[in-house]
Amino acid sequence: MLNVAILVSGGGTNLEAILLAKDRGELPDTNISYVVSNKRDAFALERAKKHNIKSLYIPNKNFEEELSNLLLENNIDLIVLAGFLKILSKEFVIKYPNKIINIHPSLIPSFCGKGYYGIKVHEEALKRGVKLTGATVHYVNEIPDGGKIILQKAVAVEDGDTPEILQKRVMESAEWKLLPSAIDLISKEKKCKA
Ligand code: GAR
């Protein structure tokens, strides 16, 4: 089993997509061990509770230290950033090579890196006038949004799109499918190596 901790900061629709995929039996080799938030009022924490998944709020001040302890105590194999909007330090990231993945709401290398997160990504895509955008799941390294790409899916931009409309389309047709698929892929790789 791939033991996973999911890090969140906000609404948690990507978390919900993972938990629903698990409920449907689509992640047979994955165990969702913990949901951790750096925001006390993140709705994602409520979603975790509803699915009976252990959850924890860790303030930004002690975040990485407490998270490291939790990862060790719970034998976590993979850290999934699902709408986690804090940038992890270089010192933290280099301790977990190929053990952290992130979902980003654009086709990397477009509209990514420092300052590109959430709705801002879609605002910039619309400003630039791209006809295609999408989502990317990638490994996390010390460069923001710079790690090896695992999966990508393109989504069309349509006339009259607002950032909110585009965000919803990218989530529904790309993000909520890609992130569970990437986790399943990694769990199958672990199974093959065992
Ligand atoms: C998602 O669109 C996710 O891709 C994005 O934040 C949103 C969180 O929504 N993440 C980033 O921009 C990371 N750079 P959610 O809390 O409903 O999953």
Image (cartoon, grey):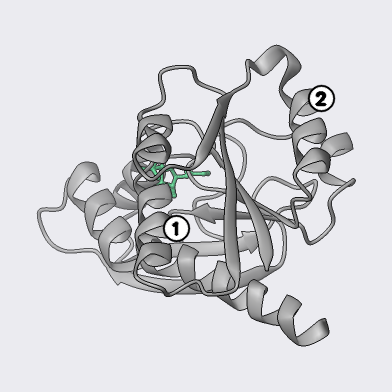
Foreground mark, 2 or 1, reads 2
**Could you tell me how far apart the alpha carbons at marks 2 and 1 are, in whole angstroms?**
30 Å
Image quadrant holding the C terminus, namely bottom right
Report if residue 116 is visible in the image.
no
**Residue furthest out toward the front:** 52
Query: What is the number of the mark on residue 167?
Result: none
Q: Amino acid at mark 2?
A: Glu
Label 2 within 8 A of ligand 1 by Cβ = no
Tell me the residue at 12%/60% (across/down): 159
Left or right: 20 as drawn, with respect to 40? left
Tell me the residue at 59%/60% (across/down): 31
Closest to the observer, 159 or 163: 163
Please state the horizontal and vertical placement of residue 61, each as a whole percent of the image: 71, 12
Q: Name which quarter of the figure residue 98 lies in.
A: bottom right
Q: Secondary structure at mark 1?
A: loop
Please state the horizontal and vertical placement of residue 69, each as a whole percent of the image: 82, 32
Query: What is the number of the mark on residue 65?
Result: 2
**Residue furthest out toward the bottom:** 192
Please state the horizontal and vertical placement of residue 119, each as a whole percent of the image: 35, 39
Dot placed on the residue nearer the N-terminal end, 2 or 1: 2
Left or right: 20 as drawn, with respect to 84? left
Q: Which residue is mark 1?
A: 106
Image quadrant holding the N terminus, namely bottom right
Report if residue 146 is visible in the image.
yes
Q: Amino acid at mark 1?
A: Ser
Tell me the residue at 75%/87% (across/down): 192
